[in-house]
Amino acid sequence: MPVSTPDSTPAQNPDLEIKDALMIFNAVWDKLEAERGRDRMRFPKELILLGGAPGSGKGTNTDYICKVRDITSDPIVISSLLDSPEMKALKDGGHMINDRDVVDILFRKMLDPTYREGVVLDGFPRTKVQVECIKMLYDQMVTLRREFQDTPLKVHFKQPIYHIMVLFIDEAESIARQLKRGREVIAHNEEVKRTGSGQLFEERPTDTNEELARNRYRTFKEQTYDALISLKQIFHYHLINAQLPLNAVQANIFKELEYQSSLELDPRTYDVLRNLPEAADIINHARRDLVYRLDRYHLEEQELFRDVVELIQDKIMPIIVPHAISGRAHVNTEDSLLGKPKAITMLIDVFSERGFFASVDIHRKEIPSRFDLKTGKIECREKKVFRIMIRFKGSEIRRG
């Protein structure tokens, strides 16, 4: 099987690499399309291309990345896809498997409906040819989306989202982690053999030999890292310092991958929603705006404002106080003062300023007030009940 190695492959002309990638991509794509049909070329909506130096914690953080992005499918680990005995021997020797084989087996895997909404690709792309192939895949997904956007199949061809995430550690840390992992695996396997209980783990040559570990890191730095960083100007790119403690690494991952509607929604959907404020925008200056409104009430509508405060103090607070433990009170009132819309707004703002959360629901009911014996006509009056819900942090009682 043809392979390339970091030591023996001469540097290619970038134009030749692009031509090679085009030939490889077209061959793989045309074969898949012939087998499945164009309307079945349904790739994952979201791809997270996860790369990292050996020992950087890709396996440790993959589940967390999936959780942040709400991806329920298992990650596609390229090294596991290419785990035949022959290919395993090549990888252990520091070789890289033929790009055509990698692209073909990966694309076939991604067409599995399990990955329809999204998937993490652990270890792809690793070469410039693979980078070009992933760019061509994105272009094809956009083309398919346009092609089917006015058909019943449009639901299967959504706006693709690509994230490039690189977990970075320096050479010394990578080597130390690889060798530490090797020692732990050897110790584990010795215990399994001694007790006959448990499952043997794979012992990688690069995890027990410092020079092989160093070569593996340098292969990543010279090929995989350069391949991934070349996508920085095209897709969402996230470089994570993986030498930090795990909680700090995951906090940075969350910050990088949290939801952003302008990047993730279909542009036409976002255009419909864009004029609606986000909750964060509303709450950002909520306290300042509340102070401004309360001062305006007192300056411009002083009498109504004082009446509202008196209503709260004399009629509502006596009901709230006995509910101090639960932190929740329901108050029903027919007070005509609240028939003024501005009074309800004032009431809610006053409670907010005092640390309560208040909401008001108006319940209307027709009540018979007069019955005409001659005509049988019933005259009714409208009964208006203001249902006020007040919530606040209740008291904590230590129980013995």
Image (cartoon, rainbow, N blue to C red):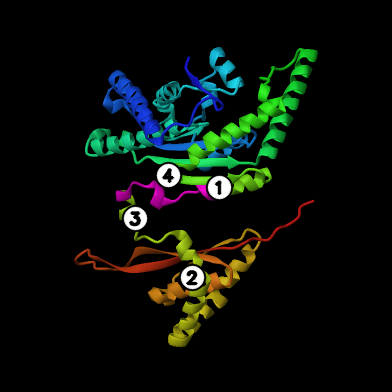
Is label 2 in a helix, a strand or a loop?
Answer: helix
Magenta portion: prevailing SS class: helix
Out of 21 and 163, give the one closest to the viewer. 21
Query: Looking at the picture, how far across and down is residue 346, in whole percent?
Result: 46, 75
Residue, disc 4: 235
Mark positioned earlier in the residue sequence (4 or 2): 4
Task: Please give the range of residues in magenta.
Answer: 253-268
Task: Mark 1 vs mark 2: give the one in front.
Answer: 1
Q: CA distance from mark 1 to mark 2?
A: 35 Å
Query: Looking at the picture, how far across and down is residue 303, in whole percent?
Result: 46, 86
Residue, disc 1: 254
Task: Mark 1 vs mark 4: give the one in front.
Answer: 4
Q: Is residue 44 visible?
A: no
Query: Looking at the picture, how far across and down is residue 398, in whole percent?
Result: 76, 55
Can residue 306 be found in the magenta stretch? no
Is label 3 in a helix, a strand or a loop?
Answer: helix
Residue, disc 3: 273
Mark positioned earlier in the residue sequence (2 or 3): 3
Q: CA distance from mark 4 to mark 2?
A: 46 Å
Picture residue at 55% right of the left edge, 46% below the top: 239
Q: Are marks 4 and 2 in contact (CB under 8 Å)?
A: no
Out of 99 and 345, give the one closest to the viewer. 99
Determine crowd level at label 2: few under 14, some 14-19, many 20+ residues with C-alpha closer than 10 A: some
Task: Mark 2 vs mark 3: give the one in front.
Answer: 3
Q: Is residue 183 visible?
A: yes
Mark positioned earlier in the residue sequence (1 or 2): 1
Q: How many marks?
A: 4
- Name which residue type carries label 3: Leu
Q: Are marks 3 and 4 in contact (CB under 8 Å)?
A: no
- Name which residue type carries label 1: Phe
Can residue 262 be found in the magenta stretch? yes
Q: Which mark is residue 348?
A: 2
